[in-house]
Image (spheres, rainbow, N blue to C red):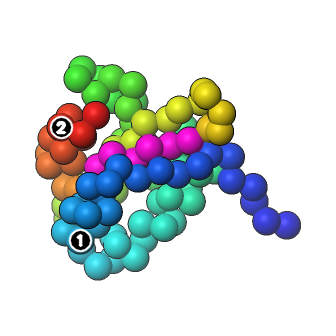
Amino acid sequence: MATKKRYQIKLHNLVTARDLSSLPSQLKKDFPQYQKVLSLNPYQTKGIPSYNLTGYLKGYRALEIDYNNLSYRLVYRIYEKPKPKRVLIISFAEHNPAYERAKQRK
């Protein structure tokens, strides 16, 4: 039985145009899996640490992704209303650049 996706995944245009091309090939390859996890439940992310952001990015969340001794962050916002429920991914990069890009794109 297939698992039903509960949230539509949307990408900020610069995630596709800029962020993904600068990631290591393994993270690019894993990106569809991150999207799937978020589409099922963006609050409980199947063993991938995630948390609510504060300050200027309050209302957003981030996935913690460690790869090759570097910390990456996938920053996203959840929209419950209006329907359909959706997740907007606004940045995916190394730790500090991910947050800086998210601030510029929100």
Seen in the picture, residue 35 relative to 52 is either above or below; the reply is: below
Residue 13 in the image, given as x and y percentages of width and height? 32, 54
| Separation of marks 1 and 2 at Cα, in angstroms | 19 Å
Q: Quadrant of the N terminus?
A: bottom right
Over which residues does the magenta segment extend? 86-92
The amino acid at mark 1 is: Ser
Is-magenta flag for residue 88? yes
Seen in the picture, residue 88 relative to 47 is either above or below; the reply is: above
Magenta: main secondary structure equals: strand
66 vs 20, nearest the viewer: 20
Q: Are marks 1 and 2 in contact (CB under 8 Å)?
A: no
- Residue 104 numbered tag: 2
Seen in the picture, residue 35 relative to 41 is either above or below; the reply is: below
Task: Give neighbour class at mark 2: few <14, some 14-19, many 20+ (Cα, 10 Å).
Answer: few
Instruction: Please name the residue that numbered disc 1 is placed on.
Output: 21
Q: At x 33% / y 77%, what residue is drawn?
A: 26
Q: Quadrant of the C terminus?
A: top left
Residue 44 in the image, given as x and y percentages of width and height? 57, 42
Who comes first in sequence, dot 1 or dot 2?
1
Camera sees residue 91: yes
Residue 63 in the image, given as x and y percentages of width and height? 39, 47
Q: At x 19% / y 55%, what residue is drawn?
A: 94
